[in-house]
Amino acid sequence: MGTDTLRTDAADGADGRRREQRGWYFYDWACSVYSTSVLTVFLGPYLTSVAESAADADGYVHPLGIPVRAGSFFAYSVSLSVIVAVLVMPLVGAAADRTGRKKPLLAAAAYTGAAATTAMFFLDGDRYLLGGLLLVVANAAQSVAMMLYNSYLPQIAPPEERDAVSSRGWAFGYAAGALALVANLILYTAHDSFGLSESAAVRICLASAGLWWGAFALIPLRRLRDRRAPAREGSALPGFRQLAATVRDMRRHPFTLAFLLAYLVYNDGIQTVISQASVYGSEELGLGQSTLIVAVLLVQVLAVAGALALGRLARTYGAKRTVLGSLVAWTVTLAAGYVLPAGEPVWFFVLAAGIGLVLGGSQALSRSLFSHLVPPGKEAEYFAAYELSDRGMSWLGPLLFGLTYQLTGSYRDAIISLVAFFVIGFVLLARVPVRRAIGDAGNPVPARI
């Protein structure tokens, strides 16, 4: 940014910055219920059951005439949603930096996703294609919105605050997810008392996530500010030409690209575990929906503590070392998941606890670490690339999960295949010289990173 739009607007003073940070936290509060209730808990098993009701005698559905095993349809839909997001995010990111008007774009993406999620109330019977379409729209919209939301971080927090601010944002999100899941659990387990069928209760839980998303998105949209875009060469380029210019610019920062590659790999594993854990629990371990809700609720509660605890560890050991430690924990947790006995909820809860303790921290610290690697004035464009790493290769994990199940018929084989993402990601991240990368991007190097 230019002198008119410093990355942290000192002219606004600490009070103005804190107010904007508090508003920023609330977008995590708004959209995380979608990630938790919809993507992690209800939609996977429910959409799988809808696809199974539409399947032929061999267990296949045929979207666009393509034979797909019903148990793989949800994973393939997640993959398709990510591909759509990959096509849209660079255009929106370039437009945000070119115009300086992030907030209207954030509003458009957030409310598109919220509307698609609310419309999941109409997903019943054998309407698996409707479910797939709404999932693609909601998931792609969430990716675009998160890219814009994340790009505010270097503007609202100076370098020394970013680990803490990013961790608080994730903690807000997991707290919201836990609160919504408590309400979901009450509705689902007592659906007969409310005069609802099990299907109706699930559809209400899905739709309520969309209403929550739309309602609480109003808070960050009121508090976050647009910054005037800096005048720079190429600012009038169309979206794809601007994307090409951004990619060429990023080649001048090879260590930033190296971090993105590492994040791309290990985050693909994280996102796939999040989206497929409930399917694994219900289909392979034979656990009921109530057990899955309690397990995810446990993840949410512990993720709040985990995000804040790993944020404190980062202040002592540095964000890079802390993230590397979390990747080791992810690998051990997945290996344990492979040998979990079926029909034993207690062990599934232990696994959920392990996931919760590392989930929020690994994501929050990765976000704050990347914010140090962004050249001044190119936040949205570079965070578009970050979100592409966040979501853009996240089609590969679900695709591998779905293909492994399709070829082997075993969800255990599918879940253990994800270990490769964490091992390779660890090796790639360990090779990134973070302090040098921050300096090469033109940013001050924190004392501990």
Image (cartoon, rainbow, N blue to C red):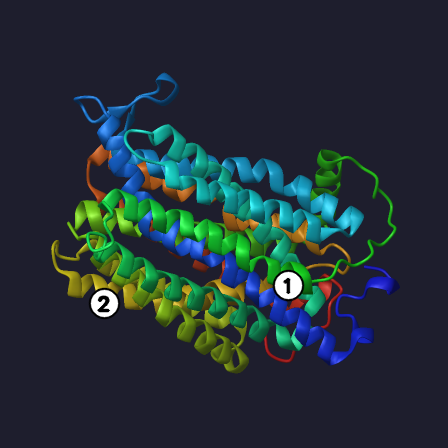
Q: Residue at x 30, y 47 (%)?
A: 202
Which corner quadrant of the image does residue 36 belong to? bottom left
Classify 10 Å Cα crowding around label 1: few (below 14), some (14-19), many (20 and above). Answer: many
Dot 2: what SS?
helix
Classify 10 Å Cα crowding around label 2: few (below 14), some (14-19), many (20 and above). Answer: some
Residue 119 locus on image (x, y percent): 44, 40
Label annotation for residue 371: 1
Q: Is residue 447 above or below residue 241?
A: below
Residue 250 locus on image (x, y percent): 70, 49
Reading the image, the residue beneath label 2 is 350
Q: Residue at x 12, y 56 (%)?
A: 341
Dot 1: what SS?
helix
Is residue 157 visible in the rendered image? The answer is no
Residue 78 locus on image (x, y percent): 41, 40
Residue found at the far bottom of this picture: 316
Viewer-closest of 176 and 384: 176
Label 2 amino acid? Val
Is residue 125 visible in the rendered image? The answer is yes
